[in-house]
Amino acid sequence: MRVLVLGGDGYLGWPTSMHFAARGHEVMAVDNYLRRRIAQETGSEPLFPTPNLQDRATFYRQAGGRSIEVRIGDCADYRFLARVFADFKPDVAIHYAEQPSAPYSMIAYDEAWLTLHNNLTATFNVIWATMEHAPDCHIVKLGTMGEYGTPNIDIEEGWIDIEHKGRKDRFLFPRAAGSLYHTTKVLDTDLLWFYVRVHGLRVTDLMQGPVYGLSTPESDRDGRLLPNFHYDDIFGTVVNRFLVQAVAGVPLTVYGKGGQTRGYLNLLDTLQCIELAASSPAQRGELRIFNQFTETFTVNQLAEHVQIAGRAMHLAVTVQNLANPRKEREEHYYNPAHKGLAELGLEPHPMTTGILTAMLGQVIAHRDRIDARKILPRVRWS
């Protein structure tokens, strides 16, 4: 396939680019370094520096990998993105090109505006570039389980059948996002569904839970190929953040009571899910939604897993409950369905002590770069 990875410099985008290239596909990675810039602006740089996207592609090729074409530009600029689609003619467009942080979107007006403008404009442009220049292209869009919120009913896989006053119909499952970032993802889904209905696009929307992980078979060829690994309170996902805190000797920061439950998955499983979705495309006129996670944990359970792994590495790991800076239910019902990707062949990597200790070993190798000032919450919802 001709695989276009939008947001190809990101934590997921770069491993995805290498993953598809390693399997013989023609890959183009596109990015404008937005996340690098706003991470610098907020003092949220990753644990270790990563080469720019062009150099990453060069180092990957020198390490025995296939060629990855790189374009630097803004997906929120339609003329740029239209040229990319017209030139590359993708079979599948994997859309990661969004500001990915809930805390960042809640800092102040400027950060909220950037999130809203970038995320919705990029998705709108992907839709139109597909319609005008690659109408058979399958859009694989990264959504988030955070779109659903924490309803007091089972969360279905994207859709729900409703019977009301003796009549039945099928609707998108109700959304109740907990941040502006998650709200932009809800609006993405609505935009895609509108254009699927009207113009017959083929779209897979992946409702992904928080991801953890550091290395992949491709990045293991050369340490310079590792993904951006954030551990701060703004861009770092909770498992990655806890692992760095464990190495730094900083108590694991559990917000509130720690009963918040979410669906998590290993970075390796994200790559599997994306490949499975791309290899079995949605039908024309179909918005296919998968809930993309493999296990559910409370924050307290995650902290316990990291403590056990820390003891195995002779680390003294403690936990500190902090006043929750977010507006969210800290104890709630949570039972989301996630059968679709398993039916396509997903073989999960469960969160084992061995996986966590391997990650701790990689973090230890960079422990001199940990800046504890980035760990405690700096953003409050109100």
Image: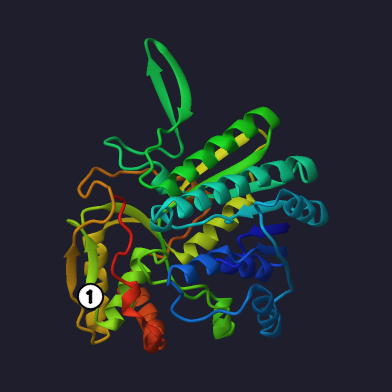
The location of residue 278, given as percent across then percent down, is: 63, 52
The colour scheme of the drawn protein is: rainbow
Number of numbered discs: 1
Residue furthest right as drawn: 87
Q: Secondary structure at mark 1?
A: helix
Residue depicted at 57% across the width and 83% down the height: 224
User: Could you say which is closer to the camera, residue 40 or residue 100?
Assistant: 40
Residue furthest top as drawn: 166
Quarter of the image for residue 314 reads: bottom left
The location of residue 56, given as percent across then percent down, is: 64, 77
User: Could you say which is closer to the camera, residue 222 or residue 31?
Assistant: 31
Taking the image as shown, residue 259 lies to the left or right of residue 188, namely left
Q: Quadrant of the N terminus?
A: bottom right
The answer to whether residue 194 is above or below residue 348 is above
Taking the image as shown, residue 88 lies to the left or right of residue 314, namely right
Residue furthest front as drawn: 109
Q: Is residue 174 visible?
A: yes
The answer to whether residue 311 is above or below residue 336 is below
The location of residue 149, given as percent across then percent down, is: 35, 42
Quarter of the image for residue 241 reads: bottom left
The location of residue 254, given as percent across then percent down, is: 23, 63
Q: Is residue 282 visible?
A: no
Disc 1 designates what residue? Answer: 308
Q: Residues within 10 Å of mark 1 (few under 14, many from 20)?
A: some
Quarter of the image for residue 311 reads: bottom left
Name the amino acid, label 1. Answer: Ile
User: Could you say which is closer to the camera, residue 183 or residue 86?
Assistant: 183
Residue depicted at 79% across the width and 45% down the height: 133
The answer to whether residue 160 is above or below residue 320 is above
